[in-house]
Image (cartoon, rainbow, N blue to C red):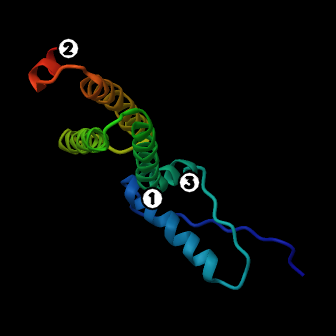
Amino acid sequence: GIASSRFFVIPKDMSTKEREKNAMVAAREIADREPVKMITFEPNFLLLEQILEILPSTFQTVGIAAAAMLGVAFLFIPSSIATLFVTFTLVSIDVGLVGYMALWGVQLDIASMTSIIMCIGFSVDFSAHITYAYVRSEEAKPDKRLAE
């Protein structure tokens, strides 16, 4: 019998990465539903896989970072309301960053995902330290707390 075989498929009109990604997904779906064991491969699939997985990976990473920041902030900031404001600040900055990226036409890739994650770190750093200093201040009046 035949131990293995190979055939080539040459798609037409692969002018964008989105079309290439859709062709990759379609080829995998065909291979999965057929009774014959098949493997789909094309060297560009490595890059297309990144396009396919970057959005869920970004949401997951940002969610984990926000949850970790919330947990750490609850441990170190003595006011629960202040901790929620720090978390809101983080979410607000990230939403603004993603909005500006969309406005400027920045594609979501590994570099832009790294920028979003670094933005979490910077926004936490400033907002958490300022909030902690405000909450721990000995001053009675809010404007004096801000000045301290």
Give the label on residue 45, or none.
Answer: 3
Q: Is residue 114 left or right of residue 87?
A: right
Q: Nearer the viewer, residue 20 or 64?
A: 64
| Residue 94 versus residue 37 in the image, above or below | above
Q: Which residue is mark 2?
A: 148
Where, by quadrant of the figure, is residue 129 drawn? top left
Q: Which residue is mark 1?
A: 20
Residue at the image position 35 percent from the left and 27 percent from the top = 122
Element at label 3: helix
Element at label 2: loop
Element at label 1: helix
Position of residue 58 measured from the top left corner of the image (x, y, whole percent): 42, 48
Q: Nearer the viewer, residue 47 or 102?
A: 102
Residue at the image position 27 percent from the left and 38 percent from the top = 82
Residue at the image position 31 percent from the left and 27 percent from the top = 132
- Whichever of callouts 1 and 2 sits on the residue coming sooner in the sequence is 1
Q: Identify residue type, mark 1.
A: Glu
Position of residue 6 measured from the top left corner of the image (x, y, whole percent): 73, 67
Q: Is residue 36 left or right of residue 46?
A: right
Q: Is residue 23 left or right of residue 33?
A: left
- Whichever of callouts 2 and 3 sits on the residue coming sooner in the sequence is 3
Distance, label 1 to label 3, CA atoms, is: 9 Å
Count neighbours of disc 1 (C-alpha within 10 A) and say few if under 14, some if 14 to 19, many if 20 or more: some
The number of callouts visible is 3
Q: Residue furthest top?
A: 148
Distance, label 1 to label 2, CA atoms, is: 57 Å
Count neighbours of disc 3 (C-alpha within 10 A) and say few if under 14, some if 14 to 19, many if 20 or more: some
Which mark is in front, 2 or 3? 2
Q: Identify residue type, mark 3.
A: Phe
Q: Residue furthest right?
A: 1
- Whichever of callouts 1 and 3 sits on the residue coming sooner in the sequence is 1
